Image (cartoon, coloured by chain):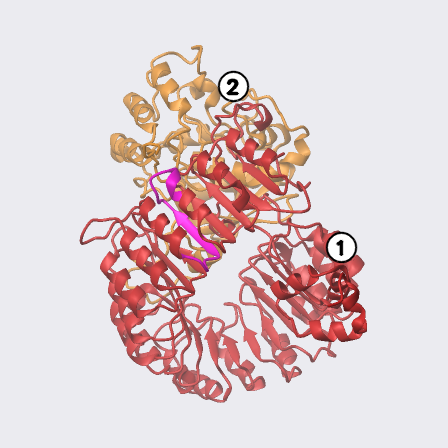
Chain colours: A red, B orange
């Protein structure tokens, strides 16, 4: 066997690159790059897709330098809890540094996907100007830009295939941004503008989609009236995924039949969403396509149970269902009977802050689904009551869960029948579901549940914990177990310094740790930062009273803590409420 | 294993240093040593604009009137209170501002200080609030609400919302709030997310924010949350990191900025008119407010007179 790296020279570089092209997964490529310097060199030149899970984990310039041939980049910014307003609005996650570095080093970039980042109009303009071959822009949960920036994209990206704007906060200052798509733009495959709040010029939109024969996904915003949907569908009968605009209008039999036939004309329709302000009147217009649907998102439609049942019972091939809790247990029982191919269910609360709760969505619905849908593997369920028995049943019925997120809306809610903590139930879930990758806990929980999770959840990658645990032991169980844990986010739990310091090394194997309203002190964070130079230990203190953080004593409590591994050192764009300890 | 910490839903159990001190100082005058409660009072007025009655009231001055306005006097929020009479304010209770995180809501329990109380004529309410503020924000809210009785035009505090719980994305909350379903049986009733999101823009800030007006019970809480939200943007203008605060509890760059550089908080109402925030009772405000804008004082000239007229027309 030839020693050292010489064996790599047995084949010319092109052969190795060809071999590597069969390794699309980052993990495999990363592993290959570690084999020897030759492979590192070869692999880096042939990687064309990068995923940066934490925008601060690496310097943009360094990433661009290492992989000079990248065509597709995906970058994530703020921690997940930013979705729930727990992260200060000025925390960071700005996209400029990345976009500038990419404009410099990746002129051939074709795809850019950003999540939870602050993207300015300047960024969008830079993208529009610098990437001659730009094809895909996907912005998810971002903010900081306006329709003026979108106009620049529309005007300049001649080969644009996907404009996917998902749940962003977009300022409306350019009403006619869509008119900036030139007549020569015929390449659109995906156009998702559902999150835009402003008016859309539907005639311009009609002309645009009329000249894009490959359009597969069209998601409108709520300003598009139902009457105009008909015209749009006539121009794009090849659609596979449709997000309606406003799904309500004055009842008019003629409108109904036109709508019904327009929808029926979309023979390839697999996904439906939107349904803003939907009522029972126009729902039946989609009955004709229900059989073919694999994805149905009714989570913004406050339609009542009976109508939902009538609709969903027709969707025999449904794989993904997002719905409001108005479906109630009865509706879920109907789903369990009809949708045998269901893989993913999300039930959202229609009235999360309501005092009186007339909605009958309980643990029974969840159990029914688990019993009736053998392919179910992903659940997000908001409810108000739960029992250990129900969870045990669910665990038994669905050993294939990959994602289980249960949110019992009142913190510290015990099993409502036995008044016990829900430790046994969640333990059953992690013990039964060997492929569980994501878990969110809720209800009354002691350290015992963490013991089970630490011991059994070997594939767990992301764990969300709130209002749970008794003390340090809980956190210690997690950090000393859960071999594959990447992201841990904790709020309002009595976890303190000791488990953090005892498990410091673990933190370097994870992408990030978020802890807010726990019992961590500044002293521990300082120790951690000193001990682990490859971690950024960010202390977020919004109250700003008294001394600046550098002068605070070690026993000063830390409000919010965000720790992440990085090779970039401390970032330079921290706002005043964030301190990076070194 | 450490004893379970008592955590209220906002996780504030550890941070109530002011409460204990305040409970002791409640009886004393504002001039008392340890804790100068008067200085913790949250104000956005011009420095020096302290009409005598402010010593007795929890005042909140939101926005300054340019001199164009009527009597030429700077009409703070407290003046608006006097004028409108009926509706009251709850004093900022420690931690009761739930949106925007912990602390910052400076409460100025008046006790017998100057004979005022939280509300004119409710001298004891102040002490009650002080005593109970430590870790029991929700009860305090209810008690203040109860003790004030029917005088207060403000509805009793809704169950205090914990920040970010239940974990529903802001996008979803915003969307449900702005796109109410029309097939509810009772419009105000069971359905709806119980939130009222409006956009807030600030002149010069890179992007705008959204706030849920339903999470605040009064202008006081609201202004505190706004400060938090926008202080990040005003930092650049105020220079160094450490602006010395009067007593360590009231440092807020936005307050300083608002008093120093004449930003005015305005809102667009149902009719599309731009009005100054603070002119109308809180309930009326959240009913008619469609969006907010923190604008430079110079742009706000001429807003005030319209507000007064509208008020008259309504009544």
Residue behind mark 2 = B247
* Span highlighted in magenta in the image: A457-474
Crowding around mark 2 (Cα neighbors within 10 Å: few <14, some 14 to 19, many 20+) is some
- Secondary structure under badge 2? loop
Near-viewer residue (B82 or A39): A39
Name the quadrant containing residue A327.
Answer: bottom left
Residue behind mark 1 = A101
Q: Is residue B165 above or below residue B61?
A: below
Quadrant containing the C terminus of chain A in the rendered view: top right
> Looking at the picture, do discs 2 and 1 lie on one chain?
no
User: Residue A545 placed where, x, y %?
Assistant: 52, 26
Does B234 sit left or right of A408 as displayed? right
In the rendered image, residue B135 lying in the magenta stretch gets the answer: no
| Residue found 77% across the figure and 59% down from its top | A103
Q: Is residue B249 above or below residue B30?
A: below
Near-viewer residue (A382 or A197): A382
Does A148 sit left or right of B126 as displayed? right
Does residue A141 appear in this view?
A: yes
């Amino acid at each position: 066997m030839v020693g050292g790296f010489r064996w790599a020279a047995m084949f010319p570089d092109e052969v190795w690159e060809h071999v590597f092209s069969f390794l699309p997964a980052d993990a495999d490529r990363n592993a290959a790059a570690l084999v020897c310097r030759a492979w590192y060199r070869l692999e880096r030149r042939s990687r064309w897709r990068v995923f940066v899970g934490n925008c601060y984990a690496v310097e943009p310039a360094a990433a661009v330098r290492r992989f000079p041939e990248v065509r597709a980049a995906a970058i994530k910014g703020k921690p997940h809890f930013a979705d729930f307003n727990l992260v200060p609005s000025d925390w960071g996650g700005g996209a400029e540094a990345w976009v500038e570095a990419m404009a410099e080093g990746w002129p051939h970039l074709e795809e850019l996907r950003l999540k939870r980042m602050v993207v300015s109009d300047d960024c969008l303009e830079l993208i529009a100007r610098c990437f001659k071959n730009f094809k895909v822009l996907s912005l998810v949960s971002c903010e900081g830009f306006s329709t003026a920036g979108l106009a620049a994209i529309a005007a300049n990206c001649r080969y644009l295939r996907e404009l996917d704007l998902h749940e962003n906060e977009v300022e409306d200052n350019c009403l006619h941004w869509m008119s900036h798509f030139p007549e020569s733009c015929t390449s659109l495959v995906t156009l998702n503008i559902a999150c835009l709040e402003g008016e859309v010029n539907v005639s311009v939109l009609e002309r645009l989609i009329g000249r894009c024969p490959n359009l597969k996904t069209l998601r409108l915003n709520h300003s598009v009236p139902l009457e105009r949907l008909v015209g749009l569908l006539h121009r794009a009968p090849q659609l596979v995924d449709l997000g309606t605009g406003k799904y309500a209008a004055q009842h008019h039999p003629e409108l109904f039949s036109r709508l019904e036939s327009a929808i029926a004309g979309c023979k390839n329709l697999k996904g439906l969403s939107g349904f803003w302000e939907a009522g029972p009147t126009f729902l039946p217009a989609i009955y004709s396509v229900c059989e073919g649907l694999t994805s149905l998102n009714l989570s913004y439609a406050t339609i009542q149970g009976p109508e939902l049942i009538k609709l969903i019972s027709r969707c025999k091939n449904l794989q993904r269902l997002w719905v409001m809790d108005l479906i109630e247990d009865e509706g879920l029982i109907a789903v369990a009977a009809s949708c045998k191919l269901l893989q993913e269910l999300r039930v959202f609360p229609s009235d999360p802050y309501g005092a009186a709760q007339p909605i009958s969505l309980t643990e029974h619905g969840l159990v029914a689904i688990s019993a009736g849908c053998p392919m179910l593997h992903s659940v997000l369920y908001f409810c108000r009551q739960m029992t250990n028995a129900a969870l045990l049943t669910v665990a038994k019925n669905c050993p294939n869960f990959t994602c289980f997120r249960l949110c019992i809306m009142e913190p510290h809610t015990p099993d409502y029948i036995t008044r016990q903590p829900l430790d046994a139930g969640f333990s059953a879930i992690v013990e039964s579901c060997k492929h569980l990758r994501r878990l969110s806990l809720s209800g009354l929980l002691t350290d015992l549940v963490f013991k089970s999770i630490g011991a059994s959840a070997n594939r767990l990658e992301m764990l969300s914990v709130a209002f749970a645990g008794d003390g340090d032991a809980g956190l210690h169980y997690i950090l000393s177990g859960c071999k594959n844990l990447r992201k841990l986010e904790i709020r309002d739990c009595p976890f303190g310094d000791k488990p953090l310091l005892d498990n410091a090394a673990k933190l370097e194997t994870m992408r990030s740790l978020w802890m807010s309203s726990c019992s961590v002190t500044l002293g521990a964070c300082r120790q951690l930062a000193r001990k682990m130079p490859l971690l950024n230990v960010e202390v977020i203190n919004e109250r700003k009273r008294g001394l600046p953080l550098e002068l605070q004593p070690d026993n000063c409590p830390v409000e919010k803590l965000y720790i992440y591994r990085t090779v970039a050192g401390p970032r330079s764009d921290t706002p005043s409420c964030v301190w990076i300890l070194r | 294993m450490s004893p379970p910490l008592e955590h209220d839903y906002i996780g504030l159990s550890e941070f109530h240093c002011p409460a204990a001190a305040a409970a002791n100082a409640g009886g004393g005058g504002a001039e008392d040593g340890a804790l100068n409660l008067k200085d913790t009072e949250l104000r956005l007025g011009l420095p020096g604009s302290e009409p005598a009655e402010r010593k007795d009231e929890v005042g909140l001055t939101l926005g300054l009137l340019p001199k164009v306005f009527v009597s030429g006097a700077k009409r703070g929020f407290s003046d608006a209170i006097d004028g409108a009479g009926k509706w009251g304010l709850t004093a900022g209770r420690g931690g009761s501002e739930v949106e925007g995180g912990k602390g910052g809501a400076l409460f100025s329990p008046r006790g017998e200080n100057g004979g005022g109380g939280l509300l004119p004529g409710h001298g004891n309410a102040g002490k009650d609030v002080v005593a109970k503020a430590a870790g029991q924000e929700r009860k305090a809210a209810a008690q203040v609400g109860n003790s004030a009785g029917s005088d207060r035009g403000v509805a009793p505090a809704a169950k205090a919302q914990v920040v970010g719980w239940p974990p529903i994305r802001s996008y979803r909350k915003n969307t449900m709030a702005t796109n109410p379903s029309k097939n509810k049986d009772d419009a105000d009733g069971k359905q709806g997310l119980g939130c009222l999101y409006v956009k807030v823009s600030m002149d010069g800030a890179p992007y705008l924010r959204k706030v849920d007006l339903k999470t605040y019970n009064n202008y006081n809480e609201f202004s505190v949350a706004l400060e938090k939200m926008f202080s990040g943007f005003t930092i650049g203008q105020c220079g160094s990191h450490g602006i010395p605060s009067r007593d360590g509890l009231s440092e807020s760059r936005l307050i300083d900025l608002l008093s120093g550089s004449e930003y005015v908080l305005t809102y667009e109402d149902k009719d599309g008119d731009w009005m100054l925030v603070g002119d109308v009772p809180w309930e009326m405000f959240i009913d008619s407010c469609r969006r907010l804008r923190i604008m430079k004082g110079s742009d706000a000239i001429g807003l005030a007179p319209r507000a007064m007229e509208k008020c008259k027309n309504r009544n």
